[in-house]
Amino acid sequence: MKNVLFIITDDQRHDALGAAGNKDILTPNLDRLAARGTMFTQAHIPGGTSGAVCMPSRAMLNTGRTLFSLEGEGGNIPAEHTTMAEVYKNAGFDTYVIGKWHNGTPAVTRGFCGGDNIFFGGMWDHWNVPVNRFDPTGEYDNVINFTANFFYDNKVVRFHCDKFNPGVHSSTLLTDTAIDYIKNKEDGKPFFLYLSYLAPHDPRTMPKEFLEMYDPDKIDLPANFLTEHPFEFGQQHERDELLAPMPRTEENTRKQLAEYYAMVTHLDYEVGRLLDELDSNGLAGDTLIVFTSDNGLGVGSHGLFGKQNLYDHSVRVPLILAGPDIPKGEMVDNYVYLLDIMPTLCDLCGLPIPESVEGKSFARMFEDKNYKTRETLYLAFTKYIRAVKDDRYKYIVYRNHADCVQLFDLADDPLEMRNLAEDDEYINVRKGLKTLLYTHRDEWRDGNHVFSKAFWG
């Protein structure tokens, strides 16, 4: 039976990979992983019901549930929502968790046999992450006081923490933990290793040598860079948007891109160490590897720096599968969601798909690249935005701050720069997509959530 190595990063755009055509970024190890497998260029998240988009995104990823079928915003996964780890644990795999877990402690105990250096939170200082040993009781009752912003206030937060590894970067710490697990794992038992990095999420700090690989003056600005977003839609005071001056400047945006790329390149180096360990242990041929991220990021595109929007730079993510029976060096541009990965892995590993799963397996695409699991996509962000995509167009509707509509022809305008919503030539396109929006609203049960009522009411 195949081993499974599931790698998820934090805030990595779909195009933050050399293999995705980005000529500015250095990702030799992820590029070689893509060459060893199949890359899905149109992998999406459905958006989020929280400004911390990663929380619902990871809940959907780990359960195969859709956005409005989670418990709250995904901060806890209830027992009736079977997790990906539970499927493998029930099938006799040694399930092991390392790194970020943003969906409550009970699901960790249900799904994993063990783990180490587990971080229960959204973000932290990469050099001093408060982490936890795996607790088979599920109590995780070692909670410490922490003054998070001691330069500016004395507010104390309570945080799950067993230990610190002072001065060890999170990407290095988590990779070391994964390598130790592989070296010392129980022989003869397949494993499901869930490795969840905190990078490249800010604060963007990394070993100096990786930052020195990038000269901000030589980095291209995104082609859809704007000094400010053309209208207000309720996110101007979101934390992510306050990380850059307003109006945005080319100099600051290049600096932030250099730091962002350096974070990814350091992460790439660490993933490379792990891939080398699999090779040296003779496990690569028996291990199905999944690499993805929980959401994208603006970093200057459309005048935005966060992920609290529905442009492609925020809802599209990298997705690579490599290993036994996965075609090598292939690219697939059909639509998939991250919540579709769980049923896909079940099919690839010959395991039953739990009844609680709502995602759709795309395993058939490995044999038939023309097969489409999804013809259209539904996207939503809190009470502010809803959108749909078909095979050519994207239709976005904003509420509250700006009752505004955008229509983009993605075939001619993949960077979503020319709004066609008021062009008479596209009236019928707009009408059709509006109907599709309401159809998906009903299918996704986007009606009872507090944000649903605020948007549709």
Image (tube, rainbow, N blue to C red):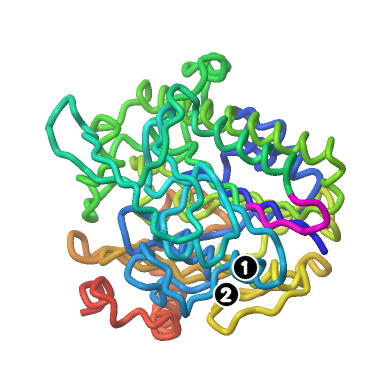
Q: Residue at x 51, y 45 (%)?
A: 99
* Place of residue 108 in the rendered image (x, y in percent of width and height, measured from the top left): 49, 60
Highlighted range, magenta: 186-193
Q: Residue 151's quadrant in the figure?
A: top left
* Place of residue 122 in the rendered image (x, y in percent of width and height, measured from the top left): 37, 47
* Place of residue 417 in the rendered image (x, y in percent of width and height, measured from the top left): 43, 49
Tag 1 secondary structure: helix
Closest to the observer, 179 or 428: 179
Whether residue 66 is situated above or below residue 181 in the rendered picture: below
Cα gap from disc 2 to disc 1, whole angstroms: 8 Å
Instruction: Quickly name the residue at label 2.
Output: 359
* Place of residue 366 in the rendered image (x, y in percent of width and height, measured from the top left): 79, 65
Tag 2 secondary structure: loop
Q: Residue 410's quadrant in the figure?
A: bottom right
Closest to the observer, 226 or 255: 255
Q: Amino acid at mark 1?
A: Met
- If the image is split into quadrants, where does the N terminus sit? bottom right
Residue 261 seen in the figure: yes
Q: Are marks 2 and 1 in contact (CB under 8 Å)?
A: yes
Q: Quick one: label 1, few (<14), some, or many (20+) residues within 10 Å?
A: many
Task: From the image, give the main secondary structure of the stretch colored magenta.
Answer: loop
Left or right of 268 on screen, residue 197: left
Instruction: Quickly name the residue at label 1.
Output: 342
Q: Amino acid at mark 2?
A: Gly
**Sequence-first tag of 2 and 1:** 1
